[in-house]
Image: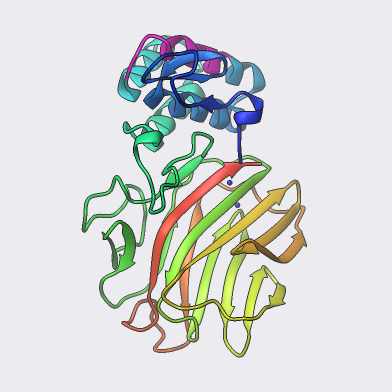
């Protein structure tokens, strides 16, 4: 179910007071590539751990971060501090998750077309496929047998069902989930995303409809084929809002929604009954989650 931590102690890149190659995160100077790791530790810790455990883990990450230059060094030293501690399984899991999510390449050194930063420091989950080899698939994505990375995006390469699970890890109560996709045809179905027991997305049958569960909103004009569209679900408490290319199109209140720890993405079809068939194909450019 994406946000900026800069206003509340997130990382700030540039030479600034820290000197070349280092950046300020939570008022501590660290290597640029370690800053995202620390921000991830803090964000995920707030969701997965008790308050005192989260504060302790973040403090340890800041101490370690000042001494190392790579994410792997930070991970290893941070894990060593918790190896002998009883009941520290939660902290070790957060460390492992953040080391897997945060890539070694600093966000400032990677960019999307147009010069936009490839991985914001505040992202809880971020996949733009820039770190996945051509022809491969992101680690942990289940059911994506008919998709592969091609030209920097994740796209269908053969006929077959299109329904796969994306392991985002635990997401906080207030969160924005964002997907950037291109459809070769909207007329035979649409795109559905499931998270925390809710469904949202775009349905194209007789009408163009955006939906959250049963809350539907018809809209015009139809999304163009062959161009990128951004779907974003914002959750604040039990209120959910769906945006398509910046337009709010659906809203609903769902107090019984379960905590989200992953996404299930389905390419819906009414033409041929399969998700990927040469004319109803989806290309995924980016999947991200940010705190609100």
Q: Is residue 62 magenta?
A: yes
Report whether 246 appears left or right of 156.
right
Please provide the residue range marked out in magenta: 56-69
Counting from the top left corner in percent of width and height, residue 213 is at 67, 68
Q: Position of residue 71 (x, y in %)?
A: 35, 24
- Residue visible at 43% across and 31% down in the picture: 98
264 up-or-down from 215: above or below: above
Q: Residue sitting at 56 percent across and 62 percent down?
A: 231
Residue depicted at x 59% and y 58%: 232
How many numbered tags mark residues here? 0
Q: Is residue 197 left or right of residue 131?
A: right
Q: Is residue 254 magenta?
A: no
Nearest the viewer among 66 and 44 is 66
Residue 133: x %, y % from top left: 22, 50
Based on the displayed image, in which of its 4 quarters is residue 282 positioned?
A: bottom left
Task: State whether residue 129 is above or below residue 7.
Answer: below
Colour scheme shown: rainbow
Q: Taking 96 as reference, is 145 above or below it?
A: below
On screen, residue 85 above or below 231: above
What secondary structure characterizes most of the magenta part? helix
The C terminus, quarter of image: top right
The quadrant holding residue 242 is bottom right
* Residue 51 x %, y %: 66, 21
């Amino acid at each position: 179910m994406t946000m900026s931590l800069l206003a509340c102690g997130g990382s700030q890149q540039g030479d600034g007071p820290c000197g070349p190659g280092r950046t300020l995160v939570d008022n501590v100077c660290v290597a640029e590539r370690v800053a995202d790791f620390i921000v991830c530790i803090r964000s995920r810790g707030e969701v997965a751990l008790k308050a005192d455990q989260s504060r302790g883990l973040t403090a340890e990450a800041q101490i370690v971060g000042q001494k190392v230059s790579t994410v792997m060094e930070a991970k290893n030293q941070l894990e060593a501090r918790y190896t002998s501690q009883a009941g520290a399984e939660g902290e070790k899991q957060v460390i492992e998750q953040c080391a897997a999510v945060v890539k070694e390449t600093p966000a400032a050194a990677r960019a999307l077309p147009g010069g936009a930063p490839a991985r914001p420091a505040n992202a809880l989950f971020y996949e733009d496929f820039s770190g996945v080899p051509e022809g491969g698939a992101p680690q942990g994505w289940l059911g994506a047998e008919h998709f592969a990375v091609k030209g920097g995006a994740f796209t269908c390469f053969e006929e077959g069902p299109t329904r796969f699970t994306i392991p985002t890890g635990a997401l906080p109560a207030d969160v924005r989930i964002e997907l950037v996709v291109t459809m070769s045809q909207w007329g035979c179905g649409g795109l559905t995303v499931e998270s925390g027991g809710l469904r949202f997305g775009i349905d194209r049958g007789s009408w163009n409809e955006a939906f959250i569960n049963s809350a539907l909103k018809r809209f015009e004009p139809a999304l163009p084929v062959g161009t990128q569209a951004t779907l974003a679900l914002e959750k604040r408490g039990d209120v959910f809002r769906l945006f398509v290319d910046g337009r709010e199109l659906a809203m609903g209140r769902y107090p019984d929604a379960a905590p989200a720890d992953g996404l299930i993405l389905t390419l819906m079809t009414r033409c041929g009954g399969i998700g990927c068939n040469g004319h109803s194909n989806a290309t995924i450019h980016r999947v991200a989650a940010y705190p609100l």
